[in-house]
Image (cartoon, helix red, strand yellow):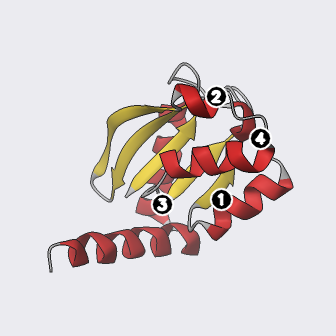
Amino acid sequence: MRVAFASLKGKYLDCAFEECVSFSLFDFTAEGYRYLETLTLPETALREREEAGAVAARLRLLKGCRILMVSGIGSEAARRVSKAGIMLLETEPGAEVIGQLDKMRTMLKERPPLWLAKALVRSALEEGGEGT
């Protein structure tokens, strides 16, 4: 499943969702994780002044992501992220991206929380249905 992190520099969760112009994207499975790419807002989206338009631009960028980890997000943006089918996780500013992936991996191995198990199953079902 695809997991995105609101990160300007790619190593830490260092920006709130509404301010973030780039997201580090990883593929996360039961076997591990791997870096895929950095998603960056297009120049036209950076000029968007209206909050609803700015959130919509970020959601288009994150299409296909199952989980989004941020260090902060407003309530309206959080509602829209959730409505887009992306599970939102909020953590402390400055948390390391790799550290958060390792925590998710440990949770999955030991006693996966229901939200993580559901996200993985849903992602696997969607990926399996693409070829049919």
Mark in the foreground, 2 or 3: 2
- Secondary structure at numbered mark 1: helix
Above or below 91: residue 30: below
What amino acid does circle 1 point to?
A: Val
Measure the alpha-carbon separation of dots 2 and 1.
19 Å
Is the residue marked by circle 2 packed among few (<14), some (14-19), or many (20+) residues within 10 Å?
Answer: some
Mark 4 residue element? loop
Q: Position of residue 66 (x, y in %)?
A: 48, 60
Q: Amino acid at mark 3?
A: Arg
Mark 1 or 4: in front is: 1
Q: Quadrant of the N terminus?
A: bottom left
Q: Which residue is mark 3?
A: 66
Q: Is residue 88 above or below residue 98?
A: below
Whether tag 2 and tag 1 are in contact, CB under 8 A, the answer is no
Looking at the rendered image, the disc whose residue lies closer to the viewer, 3 or 1, is 1
Q: Which residue is label 1 attached to?
A: 81
Q: CA distance from mark 4 to mark 2?
A: 19 Å
Distance (Cα) linking label 3 and label 1:
10 Å
Residue at 52% from the left image edge and 51% from the top image edge: 60
Per the image, the residue denoted by label 2 is 46
First reached walking from the N terminus: tag 4 or tag 2 = 2
Q: CA distance from mark 2 to mark 3?
A: 24 Å
Q: Residue at x 83, y 48 (%)?
A: 74
> x, y percentage for residue 115?
57, 71
Local crowd size for mark 3, using a 10 Å CA cut-off: few (<14), some (14–19), many (≥20): many
Looking at the picture, does residue 63 appear above or below residue 96?
A: below
Q: Are marks 3 and 1 in contact (CB under 8 Å)?
A: no
- The first of marks 1 and 4 along the sequence is 4
